[in-house]
Image (cartoon, rainbow, N blue to C red):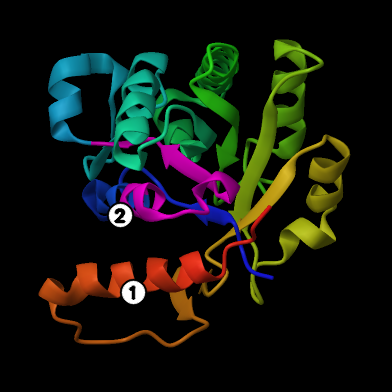
């Protein structure tokens, strides 16, 4: 028993999450059984300078993009960090941030363009499958629902490779079960991933569903992460 799925993102700890996973892969004898999912969308000022209008500013707080040119860069960067020739799974990371920036119609066009690009990346052998990680797609009033997603990927092709969907699911956020989204995703052949299973929000207030180590010396972060991945490696499902 154990796990073989690791979920990360290009921006987690400024890329160190992917680098540590890559280190695990290079040292593990069970790496072939691992299924690594990474995500991209959150950008930075450097990308804005090089890619211009393809990178959007979100309320002046951070930069974001799901433009194919940006995604292509992230895929290659993730492959390098993770020491993988092909990424097992690749997700658009909270694309809903773009909704209020570009408007609903352009948002749908951007999602369609991005997912079409990722479908091509599967055919080129750069990724195995793809999908969306969204904090709002499980809400029926979000402006972009799983129905919209299914319509888009069916336009891409009946035998498309959009097989991953991720949304919050925990003790406080269980809308996906009650509004039938879990069943819809399953019927569409998608694998469901839960994000923030131990955290939630209620009326904008963070709720912690587990205890965390506090006052950790920043210099010890790498040690904690390496210990975690060492324990994870021991629990890998071997096929």
Q: CA distance from mark 1 to mark 2?
A: 11 Å
> Which stretch did the figure color magenta?
22-43
Q: How many marks?
A: 2
Q: Quadrant of residue 158?
A: top right
Residue 34 magenta-highlighted: yes
Residue at (55% x, 44% y) in the render: 32
* Foreground pick, 203 / 217: 217
Residue at (69% x, 52% y) in the render: 239
Q: Is residue 13 visible?
A: yes
* Foreground pick, 132 / 175: 132
Q: Are marks 1 and 2 in contact (CB under 8 Å)?
A: no
Circle 1 — which element?
A: helix
Q: Quadrant of residue 176?
A: bottom right
The residue that label 1 is drawn on is: 227
The residue that label 2 is drawn on is: 20
Task: Residue 124: give x, y in percent of width and height.
Answer: 53, 11
Residue at (71% x, 29% y) in the render: 148
Which label's residue is closer to the chain start, 1 or 2? 2
Residue 114, placed above or below residue 179: above
């Amino acid at each position: 028993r154990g796990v073989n799925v690791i979920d990360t993102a290009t921006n987690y700890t400024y890329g160190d999450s992917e680098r540590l996973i890559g280190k695990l892969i290079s040292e593990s004898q069970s790496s072939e059984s691992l299924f690594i999912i990474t995500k991209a969308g959150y950008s930075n000022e450097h990308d804005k300078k090089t890619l211009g209008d393809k990178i959007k500013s979100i309320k002046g707080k951070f930069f974001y993009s799901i433009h194919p040119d940006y995604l292509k860069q992230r895929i290659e960067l993730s492959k390098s960090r993770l020491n993988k020739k092909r990424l097992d799974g690749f997700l658009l990371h909270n694309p809903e941030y773009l909704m209020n920036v570009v408007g609903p119609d352009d948002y749908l066009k951007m999602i369609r363009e991005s997912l079409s690009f990722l479908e091509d990346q599967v055919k080129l052998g750069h990724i195995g499958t793809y999908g969306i990680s969204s904090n709002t797609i499980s809400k029926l009033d979000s402006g972009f629902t799983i129905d919209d997603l299914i319509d888009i990927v069916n336009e891409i092709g009946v035998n498309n490779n959009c097989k991953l969907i991720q949304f919050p699911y925990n003790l406080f956020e269980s809308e996906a079960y009650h509004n039938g989204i879990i069943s819809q995703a399953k019927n569409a052949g998608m694998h469901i991933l839960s994000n923030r299973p131990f955290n939630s929000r209620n009326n904008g207030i963070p709720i912690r569903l587990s205890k965390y180590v506090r006052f950790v010396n920043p210099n010890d972060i790498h040690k904690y992460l390496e210990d975690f991945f060492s324990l994870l490696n021991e629990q890998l499902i071997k096929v």
